[in-house]
Amino acid sequence: MILSDADILERLEAGDLVVDPLDDPELQIQPASVDLRLGREFLEFQRTNISCIHPDSEQEIDEYITETVVDEGDDFILHPGDFVLGTTYERVEIPADLIAHVEGRSSLGRLAVVVHATAGLCDPGYRGQITLELSNLGSAPVALTPGMRISQLTFTELKTPAERPYGSDRGSKYQDQDGPQASRIGSDDEFGGDQLERDG
Ligand SMILES: Nc1ccn([C@H]2C[C@H](O)[C@@H](COP(=O)(O)OP(=O)(O)OP(=O)(O)O)O2)c(=O)n1
């Protein structure tokens, strides 16, 4: 079951679902979602210097990325073909019996701005800001203003609460993330072909 505006408000008031800060609930709580705003930090990917990223090398990923913090009153220009990581301004806490989906807003989709390239799921138990995978599929640069409502979160109730919510085991690489976080796939417990060869 997907939560409606009334359900969302009830869970926010109960305190187990957190969206913080929720400065303008009337504007941000939509019929069945909560609009989240864009933060000021961005991780940009260099176009040169690295010929190939090996996902199990966090050093290569970190070398390939630079951080930009947009000054108050300025915009971040997302150029055609760009892919950057942004962050929601709000921090969320998802209780063990809900799963949240990050969706783009139609108004930005109509400008060819995609808010999550692949991953759009916030696990039961997840706490932190949400990293946005921003890309511009259009042919004109688009100015993104920190504070603008950029994405929306929908909530689905699980049949039973998760037994091992996010944060309760040794995965959970992104728990309590603050600002955009680059891929930490290299921290996976089991990674790559060696494991497959051993299994085979
Ligand atoms: N666009 C997104 C999608 C997810 N998340 C956060 C909330 C998720 O609960 C957490 C982990 O997401 P995934 O399970 O999709 O990621 P991984 O499987 O790569 O990480 P882990 O191994 O930690 O589960 O990251 C995020 O910040 N931004």
Image (cartoon, helix red, strand yellow):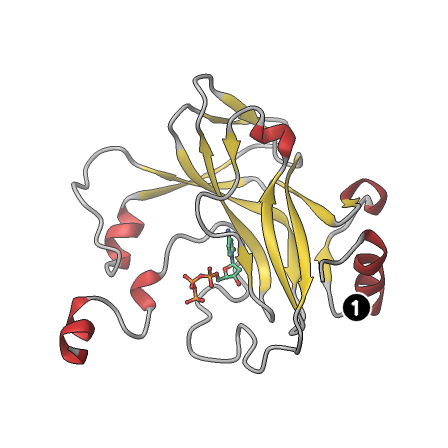
Q: Is residue 170 above or below residue 3?
A: below
Task: Please tell me which residue is depicted at 66% across the width and 37% down the height of the picture.
Answer: 147
The quarter in which the C terminus is drawn is bottom left
Q: Is residue 58 left or right of residue 117?
A: left
User: Could you tell whether 45 is left or right of 99 in the image?
Assistant: left
* Residue 128 falls in image quadrant: bottom right
Foreground: 13 or 152? 152
Residue 40 vs 169, above or below: the answer is: above
Q: Is residue 67 toward the left or the right of residue 192 in the image? A: right
Residue on which disc 1 sits: 15
Quadrant that contains the N terminus: bottom right
Q: Quadrant of residue 85?
A: top left
Q: Count neighbours of disc 1 (C-alpha within 10 A) and say few if under 14, some if 14 to 19, many if 20 or more.
A: few
Out of 20 and 28, give the one closest to the viewer.
28
Q: Position of residue 74 (x, y in %)?
A: 58, 26
What residue do we see at 53% from left, 74% from top?
167
* Image coords of residue 95 (percent x, y): 67, 70
SS class of the residue under badge 1?
loop
The residue positioned 54% from the left and 80% from the top of the image is 164
Q: Position of residue 194 (x, y in %)?
A: 15, 72
In the displayed structure, 30 sits above or below 187; it is above
The reply, left or right, for residue 57 in relation to residue 2 is left
Task: Please state which amino acid type lies under the numbered disc 1.
Answer: Gly
Mark 1: C-beta under 8 Å from nearest atom of ligand 1: no
Q: Position of residue 94 (x, y in %)?
A: 65, 65
Q: Pick out the residue farthest to the bottom.
A: 163
